[in-house]
């Protein structure tokens, strides 16, 4: 089950990665016309509406992205089936259709059906489409129906499956929606404390990849909170909307880079250069883009207690920002790019104070991390046992990524042991026949931030934001043999 959920989380990264485009377009539009929301400038209106076209259709992107990511060979017909499934269920369960099915006035229809076009339904549609693809994409029909065989059969079967799915959701969705709304309202009622609790659990779920499920409740329109879209569109309340985003900026722009500096300063003298190459690059990624996994995975498994401290500090940061009503928002992550773009958003409230908070958070991270690392001799990067060999150099004229991929693949046991290769934003995700044949030291010698064994046959190699290039080289190795 955990393996399946992790694959789902990985698939969600494809549509989520589209959000930076919306952030740039809407951010520039707001910068040009922060008061009129484009009404005073045709250029601003053009940019804001263009960005909104992405944000407003995230549910469709989720349906397509999940169907593609969960299909066995990432074929485009699976993505098309995801769209077909989504259109089927949202049409059948639209308010007017439900009113007709139940024989009542549209005003009497449960409010849940007015929110049927959401990311949750998109994810469900994508999952069902991927199941249909994996089951029917190679089915051969009789000659008279041969045209509809194979991949052409997938969208047809998906639409049929969604008929039954819609019938179930007709009764289940109002219950699910009510529970989500109650949960969301419970957090809203807790105010700043609720924001802090959300921040804490958000970080704790990062190792499993299940933080996306939690994020969807607060960031998107699953439970009526819709923090990201409301902030970007200015539809919320100044000083309140954005509370589930703002506290991440001090952590990602200041806290984690300060933690990286603490880990560098406490690294062994002979290992400082190697630690610096990893930590400083990861720290810059966290500050500039808000992509924190390369840095977090560098210590979460080496020093899990330290990672819990990081999660707690994140919760405190969200609590403080929400308490003082300092707000800023993002469309991708809480890095400098999104912070800069949100400064002119009219609904942003004292966003510059987040930088002041960030400086304080940075000092706390540095002092606390350095103290805990030294006090408890935690094995952060550069402090591992000496048998961990130094990073290997490039050989035989190969590119850096080709050399890294070759050594990682060899450390995994090569063709005889590796059965599946995939990747997300920062990690290679692999399936092996025998975990005992995996040479972790050889893999670590490439300089990767860490290795995560998530099952009897499942292993993740944390590479960083360049993971796609390494994954491409691994696929080349497999295809050449």
Image: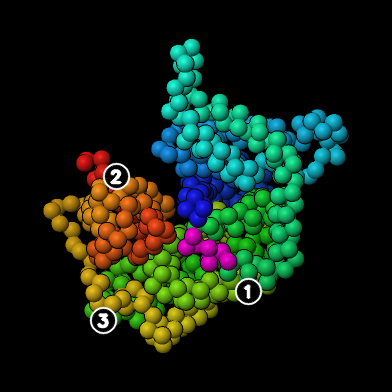
In x, y percent, where is residue 473? 27, 47
Nearest to viewer (mark 3 / mark 2): 2
Residue 62: percent from the left, percent from the top? Answer: 55, 43
On whether residue 207 falls in the magenta region, the answer is: yes
Reading the image, the residue beneath label 2 is 475
Majority secondary structure of magenta residues: helix
Observer-nearest of 191 and 446: 446
Looking at the image, is mark 2 or mark 1 nearer the viewer?
2
Q: 3 above or below 60?
A: below
Which color mode does the image show? rainbow
Front tag of 3 and 1: 3
The answer to whether mark 3 and mark 2 are in CB contact below 8 A is: no
Secondary structure at badge 2 equals: helix
Q: Which residues are magenta?
A: 201-208
How many angstroms separate mark 2 from mark 1 (CA)?
Answer: 46 Å
At horizontal 72% and vertical 44% (from top left) the residue drawn is 172
Alpha carbons under labels 3 and 1: distance apart:
37 Å
**Mark 3 lies on residue:** 269
108 drawn magenta: no
User: Residue at (53%, 67%) from the top-left corner?
Assistant: 204
Q: At x 75% / y 52%, what residue is drawn?
A: 178
Q: Position of residue 388 (x, y in %)?
A: 25, 72
**In the image, is 45 to the left or to the right of 72?**
right
Give the answer, above or below, for where 128 lies relative to 12.
above
For image coordinates 68% across by 36% down, the residue present is 166
Q: Where 311 falls versus 44 (above or below)?
A: below
How many numbered circles are shown? 3
Tell which circle, 3 or 1, labels the residue nearer the N-terminal end: 3
Q: Which residue is mark 1?
A: 320
Which quadrant of the figure contains the C terminus?
Answer: top left
Number of residues whose C-alpha sits closer than 10 Å to that of mark 1, classed few (under 14), some (14–19) or many (20 or more): many
| Residue 348 found in image quarter | bottom right
């Amino acid at each position: 089950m955990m393996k399946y959920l992790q694959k789902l989380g990985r698939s969600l990264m494809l549509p989520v990665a589209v959000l930076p485009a919306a952030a740039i377009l809407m951010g520039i539009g707001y910068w040009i016309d922060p008061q009129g929301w484009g009404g005073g400038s045709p250029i601003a209106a053009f940019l804001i509406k263009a960005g909104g076209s992405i944000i407003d259709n995230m549910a469709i992107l989720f349906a397509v992205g999940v169907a593609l990511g969960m299909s066995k060979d990432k074929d485009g017909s699976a993505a098309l089936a995801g769209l077909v499934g989504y259109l089927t269920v949202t049409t059948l369960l639209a308010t007017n259709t439900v009113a007709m099915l139940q024989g009542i006035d549209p005003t009497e229809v449960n409010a849940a059906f007015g929110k049927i076009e959401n990311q949750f339904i998109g994810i469900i549609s994508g999952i069902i489409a991927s199941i249909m693809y994996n089951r029917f994409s190679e089915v051969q029909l009789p000659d008279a129906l041969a045209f509809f065989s194979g991949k052409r059969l997938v969208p047809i079967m998906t639409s049929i499956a969604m008929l039954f799915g819609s019938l179930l959701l007709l009764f289940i969705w109002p219950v699910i929606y009510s529970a989500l709304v109650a949960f969301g309202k419970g957090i809203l009622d807790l105010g700043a404390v609720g924001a802090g609790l959300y921040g804490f659990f958000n970080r704790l779920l990062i190792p499993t990849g299940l933080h996306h499920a939690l994020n969807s409740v607060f960031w998107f329109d699953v439970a009526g909170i819709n923090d990201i879209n409301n902030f970007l569109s200015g539809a919320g309340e100044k000083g309140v909307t954005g509370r589930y985003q703002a506290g991440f900026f001090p952590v990602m722009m200041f806290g984690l880079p300060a933690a990286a500096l603490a880990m560098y300063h406490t690294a062994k003298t002979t290992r400082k250069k190697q630690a610096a190459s990893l930590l400083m690059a990861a720290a810059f990624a966290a500050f500039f883009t808000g992509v924190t996994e390369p840095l977090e995975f560098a210590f979460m498994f080496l020093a899990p207690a330290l990672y819990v401290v990081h999660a707690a500090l994140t919760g405190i940061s969200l609590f403080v920002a929400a308490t003082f009503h300092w707000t800023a928002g993002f469309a991708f992550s809480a890095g400098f790019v999104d912070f800069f773009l949100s400064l002119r958003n009219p609904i942003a409230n004292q966003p510059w104070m987040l930088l002041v908070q960030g400086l304080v958070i940075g000092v706390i991270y540095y002092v606390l991390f350095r103290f805990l690392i030294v006090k408890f001799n935690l094995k952060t990067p550069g402090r591992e046992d000496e048998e961990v060999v130094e990073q290997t150099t490039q050989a035989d004229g190969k590119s850096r990524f080709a050399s890294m991929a070759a050594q990682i693949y060899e450390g995994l046991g090569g063709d005889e042991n590796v059965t599946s290769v995939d990747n997300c934003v920062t990690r290679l995700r692999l399936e092996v026949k025998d975990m005992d044949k995996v040479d972790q030291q050889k893999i670590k010698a490439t300089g990767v931030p860490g290795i995560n064994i998530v099952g009897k046959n499942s292993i993740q190699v944390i590479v960083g934001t360049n993971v796609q290039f390494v994954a491409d080289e691994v696929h080349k190795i497999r295809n050449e043999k």
